[in-house]
Amino acid sequence: MHWYSVRIMRKPVMAGNWKMYKTAAETSAAIAKLAPMVAAASHVDVVICAPFVNLPAAIQVSSATKIEIGAQDVFWLKEGAYTGEVSARMLTAIGCRWVIIGHSERRQYFGETEETVAKKTVAALEAGLKPIVCVGERLEQRESGSTEAVLEAQFIGGLGALTPEQFAGIVLAYEPVWAIGTGKTATPQMAADAHGFLRQQIVNRFGAEPAEACRILYGGSVKPDNIKALMAQPELDGALIGGASLDPASFAAIVNF
Ligand code: PEP
């Protein structure tokens, strides 16, 4: 049987990005409320990405649940005189399993580049974390017709140097910057087109099988009332959700779409 006659089942990931919103106590309370609401979602990986300082509380309260915990950033070196930074080994040591890398807010406000995304991704993988690597175009880039060029440059610059074995450990997130926190969602077709383009980049760089296996999430104003239409696109393997993940009932409605 040739490889392309086998459709690999990609388990969806629903990842909440709690950005800089909750205290540790609020984090614990929200996860405790969320856990029973998503307990039956065996078909989905459920992840909450919390600020560093809230990770121990999040990990403790989610320990006997199906919710896994991620960080929102990581530094690329193992240790050293880097005041304020957190290493991948520090994250795995406390039970953190996932990490968001290259979120557009980090690219926009904190100088994240393709080079830092590449270094952070390798460091995360070496420590055993599952990176959710974000790419996505800004509004003016979409309007000028350069979406695909931007995605290609971000993909090649951020992930192009990985080995196929390393690449197998990542989750990709397509997040058009103009859709993040704005209430403007990409249409399901726009998202599917971008995902299809990214999957073709994976084919070109790593081959057809890694491309078929890679989970690509959509992010940008995902809500309980648009998740069904988005997930009806076979190219979408889940979502990275900001605002609508903060409320347990709303996030649970997305997970249980
Ligand atoms: C995000 O922060 O990655 C995000 C997609 O935010 P929102 O869902 O609020 O647009």
Image: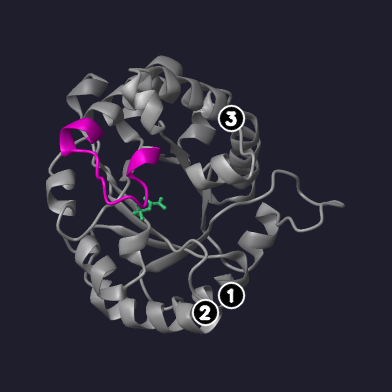
Q: Is residue 142 above or below residue 57?
A: above
Circle 1 packing at 10 Å, graded few (<14), some (14-19), many (20+), is some
Q: Position of residue 13 (x, y in %)?
A: 32, 52
**Foreground tag (1 vs 3):** 3
Q: Amino acid at mark 2?
A: Gln
Q: Quadrant of residue 85?
A: bottom right
Instruction: Report which residue position mark 1 lands on.
Output: 56
Q: Is residue 177 left or right of residue 85?
A: left
Tag 3, which secondary structure? helix
Circle 2 packing at 10 Å, graded few (<14), some (14-19), many (20+), is few
Q: Quadrant of residue 186?
A: top left
Instruction: Report which residue position mark 2 lands on.
Output: 60
Between the C-alphas of marks 1 and 2, the distance is: 6 Å
Q: Contact, CB < 8 Å: mark 1 with mark 2?
A: yes
Q: Amino acid at mark 3?
A: Glu
Q: Contact, CB < 8 Å: mark 1 with mark 3?
A: no
Q: Amino acid at mark 1?
A: Pro
Q: Is residue 161 left or right of residue 83?
A: left
